[in-house]
Image: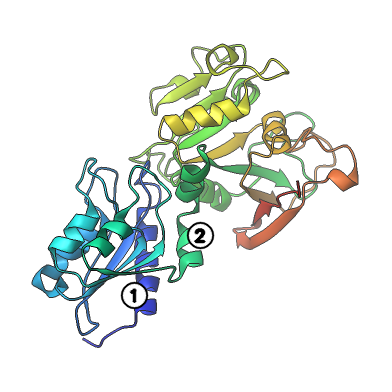
């Protein structure tokens, strides 16, 4: 087998890491490629599920003795603590790896320190190779760990003129089956799905990740979170059906903001405490406006159907904007056609302090 460059190996490690999306939380996604002393790939792996072997351990097992004197190319700094598994830094040292190339340092104070441990043992450590690319692939976990609350994605579906339902309240189906399948795939990558009690009362959603073709539930289900300030969620609501864990978050439990409703920042902090690193905000327009007004949304994914209604509820209500100068500016990062619909992905631009 021909030798590969460290840059090529990191590209492969980033692709491997992506295979763990939606399955590793509260841990990060990580990929590793092991090169022997001649630069040939002798092992590779990724973190497949929380509690399972880390990427480095999988790659070392494949490489065996050929890891000695070689290079480990890893998307995230090897962990340096003992949790459900042992420290990867020690495993790399024991295997005789001579060099470790890391894309992104670990921001978790509990697990960080692997680079220092490796260097103290005489292992060469290089940081920052394809760092931006690796960061993008692990953005939810990294963001959550750095600030203490989940990475929040607001998802909405609307017609081309911004309506989420017709004037009579009907909304099934605004978008196509292809778009709905895409949404369920998106649900499968997050740890929690959030909706307001208004949406639960109006639409009685299940908020589960499913295969729409046969209705079967995904093996791993996100936590269902109903933001319900005064505890109005009916006992018979489908979010209480036992298909997935559900938390009805009330103001009495979470804490109330100045408006008497659930304090959204406190809600996100509690979700982080519960192991949620990425969350999907699905409804409704009042709750979405409140999260946006508070500056708590990290990404927006909009499914826009080629339909016009001219009347009916809108996808977004008060977001704290009263004049055009206060508009929430967005950076478009992707526009993709999904069936007949458009999926638009955007990032809210941070306002200058």
Nearest the viewer among 78 and 284 is: 78
Image point 38% across, 50% down: which residue? Answer: 28
> Is residue 205 visible to the viewer in this orientation of the structure?
no
Q: Is residue 125 above or below residue 256?
A: below
Query: Residue 117 placed where, x, y %?
Result: 26, 57
Say which quarter of the image contains residue 77.
Answer: bottom left
Image point 35% across, 78% down: which residue? Answer: 6
On the picture, is 319 further left or further right than 190?
Answer: right
Residue that numbered label 2 is attached to: 136
Query: Residue 248 placed where, x, y %?
Result: 51, 19
On the picture, is 46 further left or further right than 300?
Answer: left
Image point 61% across, 46% down: which residue? Answer: 298
Q: Secondary structure at mark 2?
A: helix
Residue that numbered label 1 is attached to: 9
Q: Is residue 207 above or below residue 118?
A: above
Q: Residues within 10 Å of mark 1 (few under 14, many from 20)?
A: many
Query: Residue 169 placed where, x, y %?
Result: 73, 29
């Amino acid at each position: 087998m021909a030798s590969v460059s460290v840059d090529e190996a990191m590209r492969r490690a980033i692709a491997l890491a992506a295979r763990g999306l939606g399955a590793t939380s509260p841990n990060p996604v990580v990929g590793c490629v092991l090169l022997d002393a001649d630069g040939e790939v002798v092992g590779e792996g990724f973190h497949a599920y929380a509690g399972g072997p880390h990427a480095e351990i999988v790659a070392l097992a494949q490489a065996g003795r050929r890891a000695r004197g070689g290079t480990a190319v890893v998307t995230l700094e090897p962990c340096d603590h003992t949790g459900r598994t042992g420290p990867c830094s020690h495993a790399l040292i024991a295997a005789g790896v001579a060099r470790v190339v890391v894309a992104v340092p670990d921001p978790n104070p509990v697990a960080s320190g692997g680079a220092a441990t490796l260097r103290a043992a005489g292992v060469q450590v290089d940081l920052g190779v394809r760092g931006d690319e690796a960061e993008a692939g692990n953005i939810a976990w990294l963001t959550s760990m750095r600030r203490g609350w989940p990475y929040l994605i607001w998802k909405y579906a609307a017609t081309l003129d911004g309506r989420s339902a017709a004037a009579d309240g009907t909304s099934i189906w605004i978008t196509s089956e292809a778009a709905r399948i895409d949404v369920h795939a998106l649900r499968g990558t997050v740890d929690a799905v959030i909706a307001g009690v208004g949406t639960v009362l109006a639409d009685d959603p299940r908020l589960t990740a499913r295969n729409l073709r046969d209705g079967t539930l995904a093996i791993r289900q996100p936590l269902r979170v109903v933001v319900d300030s005064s505890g109005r969620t009916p006992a018979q609501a489908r979010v209480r059906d036992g298909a997935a864990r559900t938390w009805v978050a009330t103001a009495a439990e979470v804490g109330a903001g100045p408006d008497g409703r659930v304090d959204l920042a406190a809600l996100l902090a509690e979700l982080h405490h519960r192991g949620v690193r990425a969350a999907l905000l699905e409804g409704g327009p009042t709750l979405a406006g409140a999260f946006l007004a508070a500056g708590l949304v990290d990404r927006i994914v909009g499914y826009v159907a080629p339909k016009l209604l001219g009347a009916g509820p809108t996808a977004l209500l008060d977001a704290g904007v009263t004049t055009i100068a206060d508009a929430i500016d967005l950076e478009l990062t992707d526009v993709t056609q999904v069936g007949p619909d458009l999926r638009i992905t955007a990032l809210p631009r941070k306002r200058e302090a």
